[in-house]
Image (cartoon, helix red, strand yellow):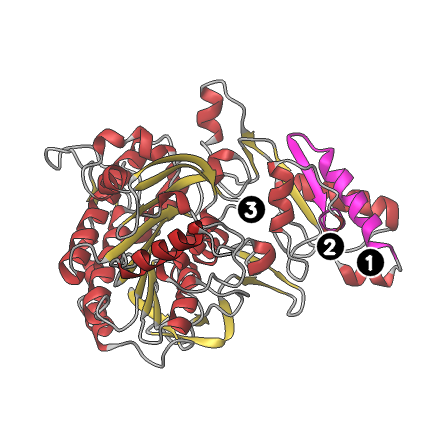
Amino acid sequence: MFHRRNVFCLLAVAVALAAPQASDPRKPRLVLAIVIDQFRYDYLLRFRADYHSGLARLLDRGAVFTDAHFLHAATVTAVGHAAFLTGATPSQSGIIGNEWYDRSSSQTVTSVSDPDAKAVGALPGASGSSPRRLLVSTLGDEVKMSMPGSKVIGVSIKDRGAILPSGHMADGAYWYDPPSNHWITSSYYRAELPPWVKSLNDEKTYQRYVDAKWLPVDAKDESAQPFCTMVRGTAVRYCGSLEATPWGNEMIEEFAERALVNEDLGHHAGVDLLTVSFSSNDYVGHDVGPDDPAIRDLSIRTDRLLGKLFDAVEQRVGAGNTLIVLTADHGVSPMPEVNQARHMPGGRLSEVRVKKAIVDALARRFGPGEWLLPGGIEMPYLNLKLVASLKLDLAEVERVAAAAARAQEHIARVYTSEDLRTGNVQQDAIGRAYSVQYYAPRSGNLFILPEPYYTFYATIAFHGTPYDYDTHVPVMFLGPGIKPGTYPERIAPNDIAPTLAALLGVAQPSGSIGRVLSEMIQ
């Protein structure tokens, strides 16, 4: 029997089909993906009253996630930049640090070093870089495979900052080479620099900063005390290289604007992607620490540079046609000396002492030998050839080494590779951070974590731990399809890539473990 309610259902379907269908949200023509290298989330709060440009635009009009934390333990540049647009942790991406010991070649390699690539635009003999050590796809790779008309460009002062976010299929990745004072690329991408990059190099823009002084943004004249100077031998701190000044960021922003115009970004058949990593914040931050007045000044300058870049993008691509996302690759700890002065924990530890304790313990138990291979104390590599020659059980050797390290003052935790392979870690945020940090073919045999605010670095401010001051970073979106607002839910920067993939209608990157931030999608 045909029920009356079936008639109503059919009528409802007919009405729905006859009604105008809502169109899909307009896709952007350009995605502008920005990383500020070493920018703690609390910089947004501490200096909020000083932001009136790019950061203010994101904070006022964008979707702001206030509790974004990295999932991995080694919060360093390469790992954060890899996670940004892959959504992967080191256990999938293979990017376990800025550098690591490569057992197959018996040498230390960087995250982007490539013996088969040559530097293009640098001085003769310079080594090349590429994304070949990255084991997964990036958002840009998925865009290129889904929309062949798209173009992907990456830029940073650091090679890893340009290469890892832009991915394997990028049309170009460019970084600054101090020995030649040139913007360069790699033969992985192209045999020679494009004419517009050559032209920029010929302008020798670095010469603007010869003998320059870094004065506070609110200085009334040059009588103000500079933060540092490019002139050696004065009473003022020597800035060192351009990378460690705000002028490094200015050069990055200028390059990004040139790329926008000369690569015709935002005007191709698909969706274009421009990744920009501002490196100078990291160089300065290491030198002075997060509590120095120079950090406030550099943050204000970063806000202004972002505003300049956003204006250039809008003028070139058109209002409402660009999706902007901004994050950082890691935070930073206070200088131990600053913490001690305010009666907080913190100090500098001796890498030599901890290594000696490990070697002495192994020698007492198993006999003398070259037990440790080259590498940092946070992730030591044992000499597996020596272990094999003595017919030892590697797990037992690791346990002896770990016990020696754990016995040292101000060491919070020590995990072995056997612990991580078998899941023998505390089931808390730190234990999980080391679990997703571990990638067996590349990782060392021990993972050593000092107590909060303690470091093995002798002089500089430091990062690289799973503590909140290193993991908590900004995540902000602005553009078509984004619902503005403040979002207090706990998220990870690994959520950025799958969210962008959903907004663009492409597959998620192959190693992504993040979720789509659907709460902010209109």
Q: Residue at x 25, y 60 (%)?
A: 256
Q: Earlier in the sequence, mark 2 or mark 1?
A: 2
Q: Residue at x 35, y 53 (%)?
A: 12
To which residue does mark 1 refer?
Answer: 387
Foreground residue, 267 or 54? 267
**390 left or right of 119 in image:** right
Cα separation between marks 3 and 1: 29 Å
Q: Which residues are magenta?
A: 392-420
**285 left or right of 336 in image:** left
Above or below, 168 relative to 35? below
Badge 2: few (under 14), some or many (20 or more) residues near its Cα, within 10 Å?
A: many
Q: Earlier in the sequence, mark 3 or mark 1?
A: 3
Q: Is residue 461 visible?
A: no
Q: Earlier in the sequence, mark 3 or mark 2?
A: 3
In the image as oriented, which residue stretches furthest toward the bottom? 191
Q: Amino acid at mark 2?
A: Leu
The numbered dot on residue 113 is: none
Q: Nearer the viewer, mark 3 or mark 2?
A: 3
Cα separation between marks 3 and 2: 23 Å
Discs 2, 1 touching: Cβ within 8 Å:
yes
Badge 3: few (under 14), some or many (20 or more) residues near its Cα, within 10 Å?
A: many
The numbered dot on residue 382 is: 2
Q: Residue at x 68, y 58 (%)?
A: 440
Q: Amino acid at mark 3?
A: His
Helix, strand or loop status at disc 1 = helix
Q: Is residue 310 magenta?
A: no
**131 left or right of 91 in image:** left
Foreground residue, 152 or 453? 152
In the image as oriented, which residue stretches furthest toward the front? 1
To which residue does mark 3 refer?
Answer: 72
